[in-house]
Image: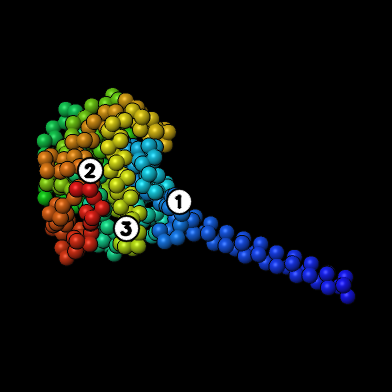
Amino acid sequence: MTNSSSRWKIISLVTMFLVMVVLAACGSDDSSKGASDGSSDGGDSDELTEVTHVLNWFAQPAHAGNYAAISAGIYEDHGLDVSIEQGGPQVSATQIVASGNAEFGIANADEVLMAREEGLPLVAVAAGFQDTPQAFAFHEGQDVQTIEDFNNREVFVTPGAGYWEYLKSEYDISDVKEMAHTGSMLNFIANETSIAQVFAPSEPFALEDEGVDVDMLLLKDTGYSLYFNMIFTTEQFLEENPDVVESFVKGSIEGWDYYYDNVDEINEFLKETNSDLDMDLMAKEAEAQKEFQFGDDEDVPGIGYMTKEKWENIQKILADVDVVSDDINIDEVFTTEFLPY
């Protein structure tokens, strides 16, 4: 009896010990899960929240604020672990973000409005550029003074672009031969009478480097003025994660400040991401893009700034050419609540 009693005591003690181990392990698993999901209501305050940001083109100085915020640890200081996905001619940042496959994206104001027209609940939270740096380039020496001089020429443009619909409405360019712009400038280079859409702060420098001198007509001088390279998210993500949106916007703006104080350093980081970039051309682009990024208005306090008046003007431009309807509620299209101005 004594041996049997002792044996049962030992078994009981071992069982209790195993139960305590299992319970402790479960508690540990739950705690780790709460910290790893980065949630604000149960995670470790030192844990970073992972978000993905989709660009509208391949990495370049026009996106340098985001890359600077990663390289300098600015996003981390705001509690974020940011991954950037590059864009390209076949990448739709609006579709990717709207589908929930990324939290943030880059798009122009007309693209955000057109997405809203299609039922995609996107919200712009900061403007990267105060005005569009898009332009039309033509070979130096060609007699092109106005948009109507595009007639009887091949013009390489993005199919369905809001700005092109606007130009066709405002100017008589019925004899233009529209050609789809794919991102390559080879066809433009080969045809000296052709015209191509370009990114004014960079592509003319690249063409010059190839021995092709060009002149330009700036899109903003045609009456098509809009915010460019906007940071946007979805209504749902904004509503459920306002702290994350605020951190991302602030981090991005601080990233731009860091970039312009450390251009060469961040351009090197950009080149690690996009090996096609050239350091000399990037330095020129960084300087040239300031004209569009900060705009001509002395009242603009800094990057990210937006006004309802300008948004309403953009909507009117697009509504007049039937690209979007005039009953879109602008107050739902953008918000300035996360900007420091």
Above or below — where is 260 with respect to 314? Answer: above
Which badge, 2 or 3, comes first in the chain's sequence? 3
Expressed as whole percent of the image width and height from the top left, the position of residue 185 reads 31, 36
Which residue is rendered at x = 49% and y = 59% of the image? 34
Amino acid bearing label 2: Ile
Expressed as whole percent of the image width and height from the top left, the position of residue 12 reads 75, 70
Q: How many C-alpha atoms fall within 10 Å of the one at disc 1: few (<14), some, or many (≥20)?
A: some
Front residue (pair 92, 305) = 305
Coloration mode: rainbow
Front residue (pair 188, 336) = 336
Residue pointed to by mark 1: 47
Mark 2 or 3, closer to the camera: 3
Amino acid bearing label 3: Pro
Which badge, 2 or 1, comes first in the chain's sequence? 1
Q: Secondary structure at mark 1?
A: loop
Task: Say if mark 2 contacts mark 1, CB within 8 Å.
Answer: no
Position of residue 27 in the picture relative to residue 37 (left or right): right
Mark 1 or 3, closer to the camera: 1
State the separation of the CA atoms marked 2 and 3: 20 Å
Task: Say if mark 2 contacts mark 3, CB within 8 Å.
Answer: no
State the separation of the CA atoms marked 1 and 3: 17 Å
Mark 2 or 1, closer to the camera: 1
Q: Secondary structure at mark 2?
A: loop
Q: Secondary structure at mark 3?
A: helix
Which residue is rendered at x = 23% and y = 59% of the image? 333
Residue pointed to by mark 2: 303
Q: Quadrant of the N terminus?
A: bottom right
Which residue is rendered at x = 62% and y = 65% of the image? 23
Residue pointed to by mark 3: 242
Position of residue 322 in the picture relative to residue 125 (left or right): left
Which residue is rendered at x = 42% and y = 61% of the image? 41
State the separation of the CA atoms marked 2 and 1: 28 Å
